[in-house]
Amino acid sequence: MDCCINLASFCNKINLNNESVMFFVYEGMITVERQENEFYIDDKTADMLRLISEIKNDLGVNDEGVSVIIGLRKRIIDYQNKIKIMFDIIDNSKSIDELISMLKNNKAFSETEDNSNGNI
């Protein structure tokens, strides 16, 4: 992890407290790197912390609620990507048999833990 942003000063700028940051570290939603007595984050973690701060401060949601919202957001993005793939496959297929074959062979639609209960 290429860490160059000081966590404490960054969180002060975005109005996010230490307890919240540690909650999201514990949840595995963000990663921090300790160097000497300071914690540092990379750009990807900074983006996630900005999103967390916006949800908490603008909507008044607690840490657990933020975790749920971000989890749902990730699932929605995953489903949007699957739908895009499906439309691309439909556009590129020449027959119904080819369409079925292409959908069966696409990894996005293969059986996984997440979709084994009938969901795509």
Image (tube, rainbow, N blue to C red):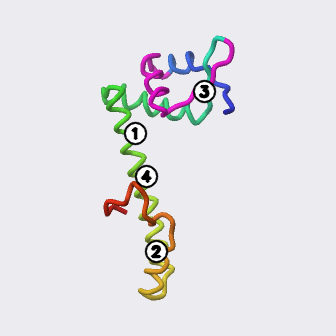
- The residue type indicated by label 4 comes to Ile
- The residue type indicated by label 2 comes to Lys
Which mark, residue 41? 3
Q: Secondary structure at mark 3?
A: strand
Task: Please give the residue where the numbered disc 2 appears in the rendered image.
Answer: 104
Task: Please give the residue where the numbered disc 4 appears in the rendered image.
Answer: 77
Q: Is residue 2 left or right of residue 106?
A: right
The residue under the point 44% across, 54% down is 78
- The residue type indicated by label 1 comes to Ile
- Distance of mark 2 from mark 4, alpha carbons? 21 Å
- The residue type indicated by label 3 comes to Ile
Task: Please give the residue where the numbered disc 1 appears in the rendered image.
Answer: 70
- Distance of mark 1 from mark 4, alpha carbons? 10 Å
Q: Earlier in the sequence, mark 3 or mark 4?
A: 3
For discs 2 and 3, the disc positioned in front in the rendered view? 2
Q: Earlier in the sequence, mark 1 or mark 3?
A: 3
Q: Is residue 31 left or right of residue 101?
A: right
The residue under the point 55% across, 16% down is 8
Could you classify mark 2 by the number of other residues whose Cα lies within 10 Å: few (under 14), some (14-19), or many (20 or more)? few
Could you classify mark 1 by the number of other residues whose Cα lies within 10 Å: few (under 14), some (14-19), or many (20 or more)? some
Q: Are marks 2 and 4 in contact (CB under 8 Å)?
A: no
Q: Secondary structure at mark 4?
A: helix
